[in-house]
Image (cartoon, grey):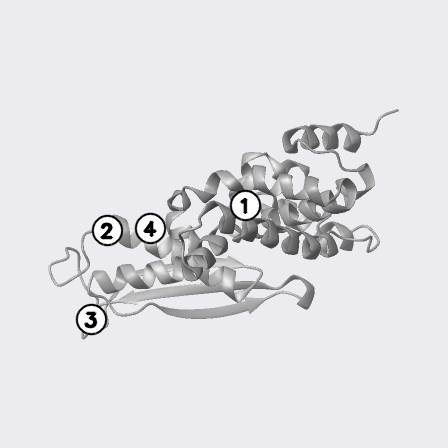
C-alpha cells in the first residue's frame, strides 16, 4: 500500500522535476518543531547546511558566466538577493512547498507553513537532498531552474532584497533621520523568537513618522521584516519632509 507521504512526495518531486529517494525527501521536509514532538527524530538542518553551500556555488557560477560585464561588487549583491530568505521563500510559495513541510503543532497553529524562514530553510534542505539523492549535476540543474529566472529581474523583489539599506536610503531621500531598531526576544534556546520594532523620525522634532514591527528566528530576519513593513508604509505615505501632511507628535 502506498503511504500518503509517498503520494504527496511524488507530487512535490513532479513540481521540482527531480527524483529524490523517499527517505531523503521526508528528512528534508522535517522541521525541528516536528522532531521535538515525535521523539527527537532527525531534522532537516544538516541537509539545509549542505543545500546552502550548493545553492551558493550554483548561483555564483551562474552569475559569473551570465553577466561577464558586472563588477565583483554587483555580482555579490545580485548573489545575495538570489539566495536570500525572501527569494527562497518566494520560490517555495510558487511550488506550494508549505503544504508538504512536516511541522509541530505549535508552528502549525502560528502559520508556520507560510513563514519565510521555514520555507527558505526547507528549500535549502531539498537542494541538499537532491545533491545526495540525485547527484551534483541534478542538484545544480534544480537550483538553476528555481533561481535563474530571477537573475535577470532582481527588481522583482525590490525592498525585499536588502530591506534595511533600502529603508535607510528612502528615509534619507525624504529628509528623515536614520531608522532606529529596538529588539526583544522570547522562547527557549532551540526556538527563539526575535521581535524588532523600527522607528523613522523627523530630524529636529524627533516626531515618529513611521513605526513597524517584524519577527523572525534571528535578529537579522526580525529587523529585515520590520524594515520591509516600514518601507511599504513610508512609500505609501505623503512625503515625510516638512511639507508632509498629518499631525506630528511632540
| Callout in the foreground (3, 2) | 2
- Residue drawn 70% across the image and 32% down it: 13
N-terminal of the pair, mark 1 or mark 2, is 1
Q: CA distance from mark 1 to mark 2?
A: 27 Å
Q: Which residue is mark 3?
A: 250
Q: Which label sits on residue 232?
A: 4
* Residue most extreme to the right: 1
Q: Which residue is mark 1?
A: 89
Q: Are marks 1 and 2 in contact (CB under 8 Å)?
A: no
Above/below status of 139 relative to 71 = above
| Callout in the foreground (4, 1) | 1
* Residue most extreme to the top: 1
N-terminal of the pair, mark 3 or mark 1, is 1
| Callout in the foreground (3, 1) | 1
Q: CA distance from mark 4 to mark 1?
A: 19 Å
What is the secondary structure assignment of the residue under circle 2? loop
Q: Are marks 3 and 2 in contact (CB under 8 Å)?
A: no
Residue neighbourhood size for the residue with mark 4, other residues' Cα within 10 Å, grouped as few (<14), some (14–19), many (≥20): some
- Residue drawn 65% across the image and 47% down it: 122
Q: Which label sits on residue 237?
A: 2
Horizontal arrangement in the rendering, residue 133 relative to residue 162 (left or right): right
In x, y percent, where is residue 16? 65, 33
| Callout in the foreground (1, 2) | 1
What is the secondary structure assignment of the residue under circle 4? helix
Quadrant assignment, res 92: top right
Q: CA distance from mark 4 to mark 3?
A: 24 Å
| Callout in the foreground (4, 3) | 4
Q: CA distance from mark 3 to mark 2?
A: 20 Å
N-terminal of the pair, mark 4 or mark 2, is 4
What is the secondary structure assignment of the residue under circle 3? loop
Residue neighbourhood size for the residue with mark 2, other residues' Cα within 10 Å, grouped as few (<14), some (14–19), many (≥20): some
Amino acid at each position: 500500500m502506498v503511504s500518503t507521504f509517498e503520494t504527496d512526495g511524488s507530487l512535490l518531486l513532479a513540481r521540482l522535476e527531480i527524483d529524490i529517494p523517499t527517505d531523503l525527501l521526508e528528512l528534508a521536509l522535517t522541521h525541528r518543531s516536528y522532531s521535538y514532538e515525535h521523539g527527537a527524530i532527525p531534522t532537516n538542518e544538516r541537509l539545509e547546511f549542505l543545500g546552502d553551500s550548493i545553492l551558493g556555488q550554483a548561483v555564483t557560477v551562474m552569475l559569473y558566466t551570465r553577466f561577464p560585464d558586472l563588477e565583483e561588487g554587483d555580482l555579490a549583491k545580485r548573489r545575495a538577493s538570489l539566495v536570500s530568505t525572501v527569494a527562497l521563500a518566494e520560490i517555495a510559495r510558487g511550488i506550494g512547498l508549505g503544504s508538504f513541510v512536516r511541522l509541530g503543532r505549535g508552528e502549525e497553529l502560528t502559520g508556520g507553513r507560510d513563514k519565510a524562514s521555514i520555507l527558505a530553510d526547507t528549500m535549502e534542505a531539498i537542494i541538499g537532498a537532491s545533491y545526495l539523492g540525485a547527484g551534483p549535476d541534478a542538484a545544480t540543474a534544480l537550483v538553476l531552474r528555481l533561481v535563474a529566472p530571477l537573475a535577470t529581474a532582481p527588481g522583482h523583489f525590490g525592498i525585499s532584497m536588502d530591506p534595511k539599506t533600502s529603508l535607510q536610503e528612502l528615509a534619507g531621500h525624504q529628509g528623515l533621520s536614520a531608522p532606529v531598531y529596538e529588539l526583544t526576544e522570547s522562547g527557549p534556546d532551540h526556538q527563539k523568537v526575535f521581535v524588532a520594532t523600527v522607528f523613522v523620525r523627523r530630524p529636529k522634532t524627533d516626531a515618529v513618522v513611521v513605526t513597524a514591527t517584524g519577527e523572525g528566528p534571528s535578529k537579522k530576519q526580525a529587523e529585515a521584516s520590520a524594515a520591509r513593513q516600514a518601507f511599504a508604509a513610508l512609500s505609501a505615505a505623503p512625503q515625510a519632509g516638512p511639507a508632509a501632511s498629518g499631525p506630528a507628535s511632540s
